[in-house]
Image (cartoon, rainbow, N blue to C red):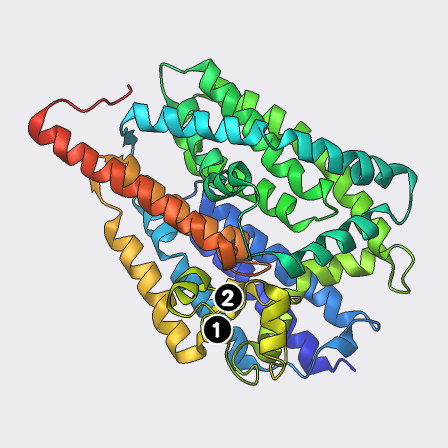
Amino acid sequence: MTSSTDILLCIGYFVVWILTFIWYHIKRPQLDAGSVIIGMQVVYAFFSILTISDALFSYAFNELKLFPYIYLYSMLMVALLPVIRFHVHPAQSIRGGSSRILVLTSLVLFLTAVLQIPDMMSEASTGLAKLITESDAGKEAYEETADSMSQAGSKIRNVPAVLFNMLSDLIPFLLFYFMSLKKKSRIIILCLFVAMLINILLPVTRGQRNGTVQGILTVVAAFFMFRAYISRKARRIIQTIGFTVILLFSVPVIAITMSRFGEKAAGAAGFVNWYVGQGSLYFNNYGLDAGGTRNGDRTAYMIKRLIDPSTPKNYVERRDKYPNLYIDDYFFVTFVGDFTIDFGPYLATLIIIAFGLIIMSRIRIRDGSIALYDFMLLYFAICVSIQGGMTLFSYSDTGNLRIVAFLMLYAYLRYHERLLGKFGKADTPK
């Protein structure tokens, strides 16, 4: 049963994020990716109030406490340090990297995205098309996907799909970077746009909402990150297309929600409140004490698998391995909670502080410009916060491969530029 103290704590957390949003724009009255991230935290906090006030959902939570909220807010802000610093001290321009590797990466993304179409069409014909006509279609598609996850991780079945997923977060970054150039390659921009649409559509064909919501939020944050470097005409075009795409993709997301929860007592609206607002509530209850730790099995999955082959291959095996935990990855605890449950609050604090400080120290502005590889590090920090601010650490499990993709491209762009600076002119787009 919800107490008045619980509601007051939720309201207080909500007010703190509103004040943070105001403070952020007093520092510099300019909308950017940080505005999107903090603005979404305001939204999540508001929905947590609706959730904790709902008689049907309030029983899912224990009594709320003040300190977990302080810890969660502090860690979310520490992870945002690179974004805050860049907001206060922005670059006037971006020093481009090697256009060849960026074009090649874009073409690989397009090719691997196109190769997903046959499977996507097959799944859509049996799942997505039914969403509009059959009330249980979304629920059935989700259950089929969940069942298949019990076999996931044992072998690589689809190399193009693995490569596409590994590189998928680079799509918005590359798309808006090429759109920011004076000499735009329409072919590359079109290829990346198609890849972006496929990346956002793939999850809903499988009855999933999370991937689509994260994909849209990432694109929005990436646009605001590049907004100052894109011409007004291009911005207007992007905003018009973006609004249309979001409107179109909201239809299957709503259909999936109605299919899965429409007949339940709380109704679809109640489950939307719970879906959006649960992260901070579950973190408050279990983030700092989940009855044990997963020892990095989720967030550091690839490293653990190399060290210990017996590491659970998927979330089904992981839940079986840790039945002692009060909460598992079926529920949202934000990306901060993923680390505290994996490593405990003390080690997680050190990891998040190191993350924020290291990336902030690498983002250097010279003569009013920032190197593309440093800008990409900033983008990675943005992805972590925008994708995991409501749900979980999106780079967990096989998502570790996306971190590898970031590091590989970062290393190439950085050291390629240094070598060409010594031995020849860099191939830099203007």
Residue type beneath disc 1: Asp
**Numbered label attached to residue 298:** 2
* Relative image position of residue 89 (x, y in whole percent): 29, 45
Where is 281 relative to 401, above or below?
A: below
Q: In this view, does 261 lie to the left or right of 296?
A: right
Where is 198 relative to 388, above or below?
A: above
Distance from disc 1 to disc 2, alpha carbons, whole Å, reads 7 Å
Say if residue 321 shows up in the picture: yes
* Relative image position of residue 335 (x, y in whole percent): 51, 63
1 or 2: tag closer to the N-terminus:
2
The answer to which of 416 and 303 lies nearer the viewer is: 303
Q: Quadrant of residue 100?
A: top left
Do the numbered discs 1 and 2 sit on residues whose CB atoms are within 8 Å? yes
Q: Is residue 77 left or right of residue 416?
A: right
* Relative image position of residue 422 (x, y in whole percent): 7, 31
Residue drawn at (45%, 76%) of the image: 295
Q: Quadrant of residue 206?
A: top right
Secondary structure, mark 2, is loop
Q: Quadrant of the C terminus?
A: top left
Residue type beneath disc 2: Arg
Residues packed near mark 1 inside 10 Å, few (<14), some (14 to 19) or many (20 plus): many
Say if residue 91 shows up in the picture: no
**Numbered label attached to residue 342:** 1
